[in-house]
Image: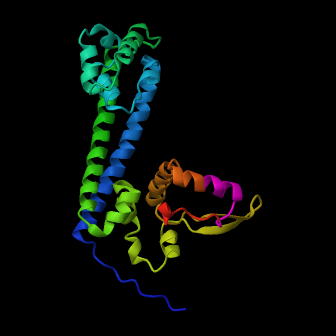
Amino acid sequence: MAKAPWPYQAPTEQEQKIAHQTSRLEAFSRQAQCWGGRLEALTAKHWPELSGLLSLTTWTALRLLSEYGSPQEVAADPDVREKLRTWSRNRLTKERISDLIDSAKCTEGVPPNAEEAEWYKEVAEQVYDARREVEQCEKRLEAILHDDADMASMLSFLGATTLAMVLSTVGDPKNYDSSGAFLKAMGLNLKELSSGQRQGQRAITKRGSRLARKYLFYWALRMVNDPAIATWYTRFEKVGNSKVPIPNIVR
């Protein structure tokens, strides 16, 4: 069977913009994850109570740590209450702010020395800056895709980040002859696995784009919380096959 030719096509200006922003988004996402791990470790050492009161991924927590660098400095500043209110845009209640300040005063963490406090600040700043860049990339991608009428239906369903990542890694789904070919490009097609431990089991090949699968997986985790999808997913798990009717939302 002769294979249909698939000639190279130079990317359009829009495709170049999408590729540029998705590359930046993935790079800064990795950077935020890396520095975020360091921040968690430092917090566990110097202020372990903080993560139970305020998520370390919030802008408020990052501003707090990059400003002070230690719970002792937080407890010593008489203006910290007003700063927390400003950074959180009045989303933190008075009780939560009081709990944060009390935990800073009575923490069981190891007090950091001057160098450790500076490092604590720097790590928080790195996480803050990386997450800001990720946020900016997401806004730019949404603006780029909103200008394309053909993407409107997919954009409202997948979201700008997921759609952009798919477009930049495997291309426009409309360019594929079949849904099977599109799934294969992402490595989501099923293949039978046979070995000493597995006999006849089927799993995805994972031969396509890793990034496309990664962001579609995150999208799927969000979608199973949708009432319509959650009902279908629960029935699918119980039945164990693909004969369960797919809800209109995913058609």
Q: Is residue 236 positioned above or below 50 on the image?
A: below
Residue appearing at x 50%, y 75% in the figure:
181
Residue appearing at x 35%, y 16% in the figure:
97
Residue 132 at x, y percent in the picture = 28, 40
Residue 239 at x, y percent in the picture = 70, 59
Residue 201 at x, y percent in the picture = 71, 63
Quarter of the image for residue 245 reads: bottom right
Quarter of the image for residue 160 reads: bottom left
Q: Is residue 156 magenta?
A: no
Residue appearing at x 28%, y 20% in the figure:
84
For the residue pair 44 and 217, the one nearer the viewer reads as 217
The magenta region covers 233-243
For the residue pair 125 and 244, the one nearer the viewer reads as 244
- What secondary structure prevails in the magenta region? helix
Asked if residue 168 shows in the view, the reply is no
Q: What is the total number of numbered labels drawn onto the structure image?
A: 0
The residue lying furthest to the bottom in this view is 2
Q: Is residue 239 magenta?
A: yes
Left or right of 250? Residue 191 is right
For the residue pair 97 and 249, the one nearer the viewer reads as 249
Asked if residue 14 shows in the view, the reply is yes
Residue 144 at x, y percent in the picture = 24, 60
